[in-house]
């Protein structure tokens, strides 16, 4: 080997040693610089691997922690820094950022770190250079939760990517989830583009492919909202009468004329109703949120969610909204939030629409979509501007709105369609709500025990209205109101006011002339299932007015109506036809435990008492206590209805009904014990039918043989045996009145342990005897005989005192468990 060759080898070896030394020192040097940069920013940064690249350096396995933010940590899979054309490009690939701790605590830590290590303003030249830095950050995940085990709040995202160049930042994520208590939101394929405008970063565009949310609301509670002041109205609910007590704190004490009164502090200002305060707070929060969103938007900003779906659950009820498209923008100084169906093929048309191509389905969606639009003021004077909501469009299937079978008792929602054109506004002073518009619901099916025991299918409803509610005055005014159920139209107008305790109503109603059969056909079968197969002739119309002020019912109460009724049943199905009651028939009764049981009744069955086999005093008794106008009315007693409404308003609770003997018979013969709208409608029609087909004596005979007189004691024959071991034809005046007096609550008797009727209850029966005599239902001699009676349980013959001399004694006060006064009986 030549000397030159040996020298070349030595030079190459030396160069290799130098390069190796440089490579070996490169990693520690970069790690040191990275660690120092971390220290300057209050963080501890470690790097697993480092190696040079053509234009910079590549790092792998980067971990970041900070003593200032102990709740958070970050790990980056790979970072590449390159210097190209004088610009620094930073690319971050993969990794995750995690934080655990209460939200306020984590935010406080981050804010403290930012204040401590904020970068000072850069010199002019350096700022220009830094403005050219580009950040490409992708493929990492974010996760925060308020606690490690069973978190109640959390935020997470996957596939996060951040691109930053000059004056723009773009953030995207494959998925994102937010949970707060019972509320949960999930989003996919989100993109956020931010621009620097006038030195501030503002949203230029926000788009999401999907957004799914769910929230569980607490069921209604009897307790007041702890964040609300006590609402005077909440304590004004009527309660059972009690013994006189000291005046309450809200009682008004008026000074006596001429007597000097000690000076008192002025009364506190009236407290706004609870619901008014909630509406106002909600409006204020809405305006504040809208202004905050508006402040984050730059000119021409767009926010769009292609498919949004939400589920709200409260107890056993749930409501689905969507899927739909959501867009947010500006409209003449207002933030506009618009929601419309997503236009998925076949999802926006009402049931029965034929198949369509994608383009045709989208065109149908645009034409028939039901659009919700919310306009919230965001200008400086937003507090004095109204908030508006518009709902327009249809017909559209309820399923296209996201409503599902089971939501609030609905079923067959695929068949139901909604049309609406409504405008709702909340005034600038947040005191007046106004609604104007109309709408239609077709083929609605619902299961609701307040309406009917049976599911109601195929309900067609239409409404039109113009109304306003003054929140500060608790006043609602309906200028125009119309509700159409098939061919039945109900027109109404009026005003309602309340001061928290007393209520004032002025209203008029009008049901225009309708054929009786057309009206019956307009009622869904599930609402009046017992009337299935009935045919009617004639017409029906009604006009009525009601006015009252509960503060002065004696002077300010009126209820008037005029009817034009020529309805007549022309055909009744076998289950209803009254001919079945001329022979033994089966009917449903109830055990003391409330269980339904079938028994046999009717002429010829044990215990049945024909009209001639019952004491005349039994008829006197029920006419005195149950229905004084029985022989005058045709099943409905207008005066009793008026008196019942007045008395219930006066007592602020239900203390008096207006059911006639015919109405009670219809309930007992045909209907169960449920109390709902369907039962009352069927009761009215069946009462009319009984009055049409039977004489008054036949109605009374049936009534006395089916009415309940005690636990599993049905009919006057079994009742006479049960209480007095007597035949119904032998009942005395006192015994008859005793039996009729317990009809409102037949599960309680009023006898002493020795068997005699309680003295207080006998006094009450004596008052009823006086009333029967006053109404010429018994003679003077019969009254005298009755007043000497003491009803004894188990004794066919009542105990009678010797005939007194002199004036009759005062029968005394009513017993504590008797009705409030004898006015509860029929007139």
Image (cartoon, rainbow, N blue to C red):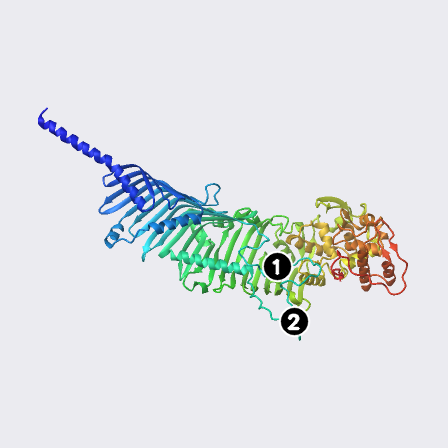
**Vertical side of 784 occupied by 170: above or below:** above
The secondary structure type at the circle numbered 1 is helix
| Crowding at mark 1 (Cα within 10 Å: few <14, some 14-19, many 20+) | few
* Residue closest to the far bottom: 258
Q: Nearer the viewer, residue 378 or 87?
A: 87
Q: Nearer the viewer, residue 123 or 444?
A: 123
Give residue 18's quadrant in the image. Answer: top left
Q: Is residue 141 visible?
A: no
In screen coordinates, is 417 left or right of 133? right
- What residue is at 26 percent from the left and 50 percent from the top? 130
| Crowding at mark 2 (Cα within 10 Å: few <14, some 14-19, many 20+) | few
Q: Is residue 277 visible?
A: yes
Residue 15 image point, x, y percent: 16, 33
Say whether marks 2 and 1 touch (CB < 8 Å). Answer: no
Quadrant in which the N terminus appears: top left
Residue 585 image point, x, y percent: 75, 46
Q: Nearer the viewer, residue 273 or 477?
A: 273
**Vertical side of 114 occupied by 335: above or below:** below
Residue at the spot of label 1? 235
Residue 99 image point, x, y percent: 41, 44
**Disc 2 and disc 1: Cα gap in Å?**
26 Å
The secondary structure type at the circle numbered 2 is loop
| Marker disc for residue 734 | none
Residue at the spot of label 2? 255
Tag 1 or tag 2, which sits nearer the N-term? 1
């Amino acid at each position: 080997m030549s000397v030159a060759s040996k020298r070349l080898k030595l030079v190459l070896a030396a160069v290799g040693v130098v390069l190796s030394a440089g490579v070996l020192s490169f990693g520690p040097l970069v790690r040191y610089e990275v660690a120092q940069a971390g220290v300057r920013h209050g963080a501890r940064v470690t790097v697993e691997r480092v190696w040079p690249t053509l234009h910079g350096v590549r790092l792998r396995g980067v971990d970041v922690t900070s003593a200032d933010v102990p709740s958070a940590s970050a790990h980056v899979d790979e970072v590449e820094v390159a210097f190209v054309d004088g610009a620094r490009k930073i690319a971050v690939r993969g990794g995750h950022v995690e934080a655990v701790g209460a939200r306020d605590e984590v935010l406080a830590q981050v804010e403290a770190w930012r204040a401590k290590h904020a970068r000072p303003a850069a010199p002019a030249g350096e700022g220009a250079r830094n403005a050219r830095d580009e950040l490409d950050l992708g493929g990492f995940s974010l996760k925060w939760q308020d606690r490690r085990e069973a978190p109640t709040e959390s935020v997470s995202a996957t596939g996060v990517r951040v691109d930053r160049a000059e004056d723009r930042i773009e953030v995207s994520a494959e998925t994102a989830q937010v949970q707060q208590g019972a509320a949960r939101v999930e989003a996919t394929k989100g993109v956020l583009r931010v621009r620097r405008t006038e030195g501030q970063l503002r949203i230029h565009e926000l788009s999401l492919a999907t957004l799914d949310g769910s929230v569980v609301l607490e069921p209604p509670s009897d307790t007041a909202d702890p964040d609300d002041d006590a609402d005077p109205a909440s304590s004004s609910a009527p309660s059972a009468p009690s013994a006189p007590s000291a005046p309450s704190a809200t009682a008004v004490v008026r000074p006596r004329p001429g007597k000097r009164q000690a000076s008192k502090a002025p009364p506190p200002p009236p407290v706004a109703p609870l619901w008014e305060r909630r509406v106002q707070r909600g409006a204020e929060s809405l305006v504040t949120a809208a202004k905050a969103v508006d402040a984050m938007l730059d000119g021409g900003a767009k926010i769009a969610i292609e498919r949004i779906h939400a589920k709200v659950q409260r107890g056993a009820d749930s409501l689905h909204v969507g899927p739909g498209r959501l867009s947010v923008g500006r409209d003449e100084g207002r933030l506009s939030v618009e929601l419309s169906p997503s236009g998925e093929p076949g999802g926006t048309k009402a049931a029965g629409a034929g198949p369509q191509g994608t383009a045709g389905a989208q065109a149908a969606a645009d034409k028939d979509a039901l659009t919700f639009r919310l306009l919230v003021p965001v200008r400086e004077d937003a507090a004095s501007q109204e908030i508006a909501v518009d709902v327009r469009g249809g017909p559209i299937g309820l399923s296209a709105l996201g409503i599902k079978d089971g939501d609030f008792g609905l079923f067959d929602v695929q068949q139901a369609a909604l049309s609406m054109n409504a405008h709702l506004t909340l005034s600038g002073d947040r005191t007046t709500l106004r609604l104007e518009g109309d709408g239609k619901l077709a083929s609605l099916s619902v299961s609701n025990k307040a309406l009917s025991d049976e599911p109601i299918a195929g309900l067609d409803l239409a409404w039109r209205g113009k109304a306003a509610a003054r929140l500060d005055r608790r006043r609602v005014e309906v200028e125009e109101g119309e509700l159409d159920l098939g061919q039945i139209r109900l027109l109404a107008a009026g005003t309602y006011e309340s001061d928290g305790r007393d209520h004032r109503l002025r209203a008029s109603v009008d049901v225009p002339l309708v054929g009786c059969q057309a009206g019956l056909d307009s009622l869904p079968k599930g609402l009046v299932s017992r009337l299935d197969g009935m045919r009617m002739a004639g017409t029906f119309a009604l006009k009525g007015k009601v006015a009252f002020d509960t503060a002065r019912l004696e002077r300010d109460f009126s209820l008037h109506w005029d009817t034009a009724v020529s309805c007549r049943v022309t055909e009744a199905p076998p289950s209803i036809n009254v001919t079945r009651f001329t022979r033994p028939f089966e009917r449903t009764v109830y055990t003391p435990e409330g269980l339904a049981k079938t028994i046999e009744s009717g002429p010829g069955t044990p215990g049945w008492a024909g009209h001639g086999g019952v004491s005349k005093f039994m008829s006197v008794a029920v006419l005195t206590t149950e229905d004084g106008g029985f022989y005058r009315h045709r099943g409905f007693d207008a005066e009793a209805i008026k008196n019942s409404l007045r008395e219930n308003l006066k007592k602020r609770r239900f203390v008096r009904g207006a059911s006639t003997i015919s109405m009670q018979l219809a309930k007992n013969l045909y209907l169960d014990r449920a109390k709902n709208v369907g039962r009352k409608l069927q009761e009215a029609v069946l009462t009319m039918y009984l009055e049409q087909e039977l004489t008054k004596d036949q109605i009374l005979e049936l009534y006395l043989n089916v009415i309940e007189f005690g636990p599993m004691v049905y009919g006057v024959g079994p009742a006479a045996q049960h209480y007095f071991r007597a035949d119904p034809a032998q009942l005395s005046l006192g015994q008859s009145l005793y039996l009729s007096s317990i009809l409102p609550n037949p599960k309680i008797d009023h006898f002493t342990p020795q068997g005699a009727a309680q003295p207080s209850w006998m006094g009450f029966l004596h008052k009823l005897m006086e009333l029967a005599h006053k109404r010429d239902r018994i003679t003077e001699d019969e009254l005298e005989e009755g007043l000497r009676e003491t009803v004894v349980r188990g004794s066919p013959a009542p105990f009678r005192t010797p005939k007194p001399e002199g004036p009759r004694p005062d029968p005394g006060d009513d017993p504590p468990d008797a009705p409030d006064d004898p006015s509860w009986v029929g007139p």
